[in-house]
Amino acid sequence: MLKLFFWLLLLANGVLFAMNRGYLGATASERHEPKRMAQQLQPETLTILPPNSAKLVTPARAAEQAATEADKNAKAAADAPPPLAGAKPEQKADARAEVKPDAKEAPKAAPKAETIACTEIGNFNTVEARKFEAQLASLRLPAKPVPRSVQEAASHMVYIPSQDGKDGADRKAAELRRLGIQDFYVIPESQSNPTLRWSISLGVFKTEEAAKAYIGQLIPQGVRSARIMARNVTSTRQAYQWRDIDAATKASLDSLKEKFPNQEMRNCTG
């Protein structure tokens, strides 16, 4: 038994010796790094990377970075305005760039055209009013007139209203004489119109314009309390008013007024 164990041990040592010598093929040491590196193809292309190199990112981290970048791109695309239909790529880019124009460059509102508040032509009798209306209709103006009845006075009186009855009239008469005005008349208490009793009449005129002109002469002389009163209303006349008209309409009315030289064109209120 011991002999058999001895011969088996001797045989095993001989096999190990043969393997180490290479009699049975490549040795174990020859299969390690130096020998294997020599047997690799193109070993010069191998590169040793530092521990913190970006090329050493794990596949999971690379996938996470790719997902984050994709989310950013999707959000930017959602915030961008929709492209114009049928536009080319470069035109779409220009459209997105022009979505928010500079507020300072916004066009200003056009100025409102100037209008005339109110103008009036008159006073027409019945025959003249028909002629005027016929020619007015032929102009086809955008603004329509508003007819107005006007009471025509036969005369206009310039007077100073009553002040403290007879005593006030006497004081005012004396003042007028000191100012060099002699042409006046103190209206007595017997006057049928109560508002004229103890007033002072300075003159009666055919037209209101003449009465206004006379008051203009009295003011430089120191008479500032004179007034105008229409007397003896005899007839009703027709006048026409236009409100809020533009300059073109006013020019057309001026031309029409020239065909009626006896009529007055004036501004009106109210």
Image (spheres, helix red, strand yellow):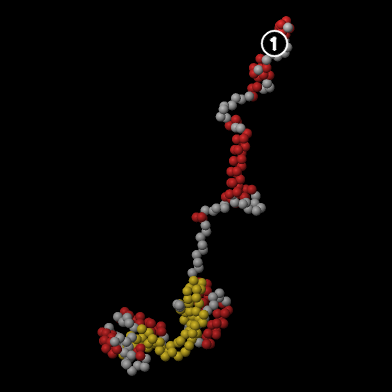
In this rendering, the answer to whether 169 lies above or below 137 is: below
Q: Position of residue 174 (x, y in %)?
A: 26, 86
In this rendering, the answer to whether 268 lies above or below 11 is: below
Q: Position of residue 108 (x, y in %)?
A: 51, 60
The C terminus lies in which quarter of the figure? bottom left
Q: From the viewer's perspective, is 171 left or right of 103? A: left
Q: From the viewer's perspective, is 37 left or right of 205? A: right
Farthest residue, direction front: 1
Seen from the viewer's position, the closer of residues 66 and 181 is 66
Seen from the viewer's position, the closer of residues 150 and 209 is 150
Residue type pointed to by label 1: Leu
The residue depicted at 27 percent of the width and 88 percent of the height is: 167
Q: From the viewer's perspective, is 142 left or right of 181? A: right
Q: Is residue 38 visible?
A: no
The N terminus lies in which quarter of the figure? top right
Q: Position of residue 79 (x, y in %)?
A: 58, 49
The residue depicted at 51 percent of the width and 72 percent of the height is: 246
Question: Which residue is denoted by mark 1 in the rendering?
Answer: 16
The residue depicted at 35 percent of the width and 80 percent of the height is: 216
Q: Secondary structure at mark 1?
A: helix
In this rendering, the answer to whether 42 lies above or below 27 is: below
In this rendering, the answer to whether 132 lies above or below 23 is: below
The residue depicted at 30 percent of the width and 86 percent of the height is: 163
